[in-house]
Image (tube, helix red, strand yellow):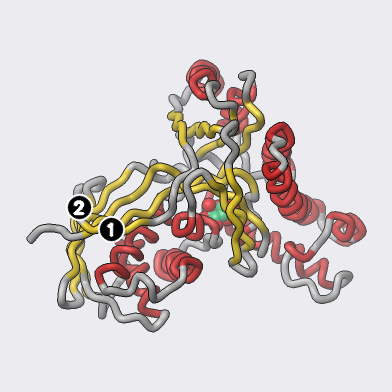
Amino acid sequence: MEPTHVASGPGRVNLIGEHTDYNDGFVLPVALKRDIRFVFRPRTDRHVRLFSGDYNESLEFDLDAPAYIPERLWGNYIQGTAWSLEQTGLRLVGIDAVLGGNVPRGSGLSSSAAVEVGAAHAFLAASGLLDALPGPQIAKAAQRAENEFVGVNCGIMDQFISVLGKENHALLIDCRSLTYELVPMPEEAALVIGNTRASRSLASSAYNQRRAECERGVEILQATIPGIKALRDVSSAQLEAARAMMPDNIYRRCRHVVSENERVLHTVAAFSSGDLKTVGELMDASHESLRDDYEVSSPALDAMVAAMRSVPGVYGARLTGAGFGGCAVAMVAPGAEQTVADAIFDQYPKATSIWPEVYITRASDGAQVVRI
Ligand code: GLA
């Protein structure tokens, strides 16, 4: 039998607003022109048959009995997504699907969210339920798959932008209310992504530790700022006033989050007045804050950012995603992309002895389902 549909979920790059999503704050990501695709046909029963072209592995499971399989990590994202969609009360049909894609894996460009969101769209389309859930709820279901089935404690940003991204736009997402606003990317802004290809082995333990430090910060601040629920509710002035009550590392984690939320809103204002110089300065400041206060950069990321910034025509550059490796993003004048790539290939290996990858990209649409 022939396949009938293709469902895709894109990866993402975050322009600014890092480690703010799980603090109920603001983020400004774009969806990439790189995605994970499911070529599939619906079944009439509740069986699922999958083949991953990238892993050259297959997996079958029943929608009535999804079960975490340690030796099929890629498949757990798909099983988890089906499980999570059914948690919302929907009843799915099975699919036969082949999947593959070009979102670099384990590089901080959200290949996991791309798999979840692609899978969610395949299951919903197969079941005639594409209109049953609004986009933000699909994103929440995908996040729940990752949090509760796969066991990774991520925020909502990656799944949200993978569902709701829009060509030539960034998305300002309010991670508390899950409302969002499209922010047009000016013609004068091109994006270059540098993949450090450095190990991210620290990323998940440090990510959970940072989340705990933010929660500790909120607990301390609640003593003097009644009614706050998250760092989203705290201003820089309030944080400064409470500084003496906080251990220094907790204070600096909070200072990153509070200032980063302010930078996101400032960036959106600068975009709307066409002030790319200011956007670039805010991206640079975000990197410095992530490096010095949040302490999630790495020598490889700092070297990547330094190489990007060494080229005329670069407005700003910063690490993107959770940190500790993965990718950095630069906003550059169109026409400067190749010069930036050349500078990365020249300078970054000398600093790190690692050969990087470079992707030149534009903001793309979110998840799609196409009938073949
Ligand atoms: C990872 C998580 C996101 C977000 C970023 C940091 O990408 O999946 O939810 O927390 O790190 O901004």
Mark 2 and mark 1 lie on one chain; the one further toward the N terminus is 2
Name, please, the residue furthest toward the left.
1
From the viewer's perspective, is 116 left or right of 228? Answer: left
Q: Position of residue 332 (x, y in %)?
A: 59, 28
The image shows residue 351, relative to residue 108, as above or below, that is above
Foreground residue, 233 or 148?
A: 233
Q: Which mark is residue 72?
A: 1
Task: Tell whether label 1 touches label 2 (CB within 8 Å).
Answer: yes
SS class, disc 2: strand
Q: Residues within 10 Å of mark 2 (few under 14, many from 20)?
A: few
Quadrant housing the C terminus = bottom left
Residue 163 occupies quadrant = bottom left
Regarding ligand 1, which quadrant of the image does it lie in?
A: bottom right
Residue 221 on image: x %, y % = 82, 67
Please state which amino acid type lies under the numbered disc 2.
Glu
Q: In the rendered image, which quarter contains the N terminus?
A: bottom left
Q: How many marks?
A: 2
Looking at the image, which is closer to me, 33 or 194?
33
| The residue positioned farthest toward the bottom in the image shown | 89
Asked if the beta carbon under badge 2 is closer than 8 A to the nearest atom of ligand 1, the reply is no
Mark 1 Cβ inside 8 Å of ligand 1: no
Position of residue 273 in the picture relative to residue 127 (left or right): right
Say the numbered circle drawn on residue 57. Answer: 2
